[in-house]
Image (cartoon, rainbow, N blue to C red):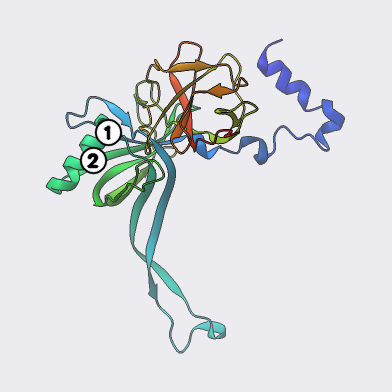
Amino acid sequence: MKNKEFRALQLFGFDNNDYCDFTSSVAKAVAGKDILLCIWNLEGTQLLAISGQQGLTINRSADTLEISSKDTQGGWKSYLAGMKEWSIDNDGLFVPNDQSHSILSQAFNNGDPVCIKVVDGKRKVGMFGGLAVVTDYPIEAPYDDAVTYSITLSGMGEFVDLSVDPVEPDTMPDGTASLETLTVVSVAGDTVGGTNIYVNPGLGSGDKYYYKTGEAPLAYPSYGETISETEWDGTSELAGLTAGNQIMIIETDSSGKALKAGVAEITTKTE
């Protein structure tokens, strides 16, 4: 049955949608993980998703101009919206060799603007776009965790709402998205020197697990990077690992391309 015909039947089915309303705004909510911050390369020929991104906040505000006077009706203050401004705060896992971070670092050092685009990676549509300068770009390297970055992009001029003013073509980043985070826990195994690994969320259909170990911090792969580490079935106890080191679990698609990753400190059975 065609989708249009199915949606028409929904209007009369499901007890007249009294409790399963497929037309409600809730069904149209957008998952934050699907929203990607992207930048154009210096030639303007390629749109790149910023590698390793996890958090994204879009800030929009306007100056407040008070226009109250003695004869304002009812004694209530009145205001006008003044000059508008926007900025973007983004953070995540730092991938120093990725082209997106090289462009951001160069723009920060030179004080040059970058052209950014916020896209819905699931629906493949642009959401916002504009010129911005890099005004904050700290990198944190804790001894017991991965290297992370945070960045603030301050807008120059209009922040274009692409849902109101769509562009054609609506370019998407080429085969890239943010690397999703896995929560990884290591507990002592059943045999001496062994460890059991637990991962949340669980393995996706058709996906694979790989792992690597070493001293902290372990370097994260880029999204879509082909993984050549040791494959793991997701349940077997692991042996021969060094307690106190880190283990990284990488979830890939069926062809071995990285989708998600997470780390934990290794705990092994000692006796």
Q: Is residue 206 above or below residue 251?
A: above
User: SS for tag 2?
Assistant: helix
Q: Amino acid at mark 2?
A: Leu
Question: The C terminus appears in which quarter of the rendering?
Answer: top right
Question: The N terminus appears in which quarter of the rendering?
Answer: top right
Task: Using the image as rendered, state which of residue 270 and residue 109 is in the foreground.
Answer: 270
Q: Amino acid at mark 1?
A: Ser
Residue at image coords 44%, 31%: 179
Query: How far across and how far down the image is residue 101, in percent?
Result: 26, 36
Tell whether 258 sits left or right of 29.
Answer: left
The answer to which quarter of the image holds residue 93 is: top left
Q: Residues within 10 Å of mark 1 (few under 14, many from 20)?
A: many
- Which residue position is annotated with label 2? 104
Task: Using the image as rendered, state which of residue 227 and residue 124 is in the foreground.
Answer: 227
Q: Residues within 10 Å of mark 2 (few under 14, many from 20)?
A: many
The answer to which quarter of the image holds residue 227 is: top left
Outermost residue on the bottom side: it is 70
Measured Cα–Cα span from mark 1 to mark 2: 6 Å
Tell whether 216 sits left or right of 46.
Answer: right
- Which residue position is annotated with label 1? 100
Task: Using the image as rendered, state which of residue 23 and residue 184 is in the foreground.
Answer: 184
User: SS for tag 1?
Assistant: helix
Q: Is residue 153 above or below residue 31?
A: below
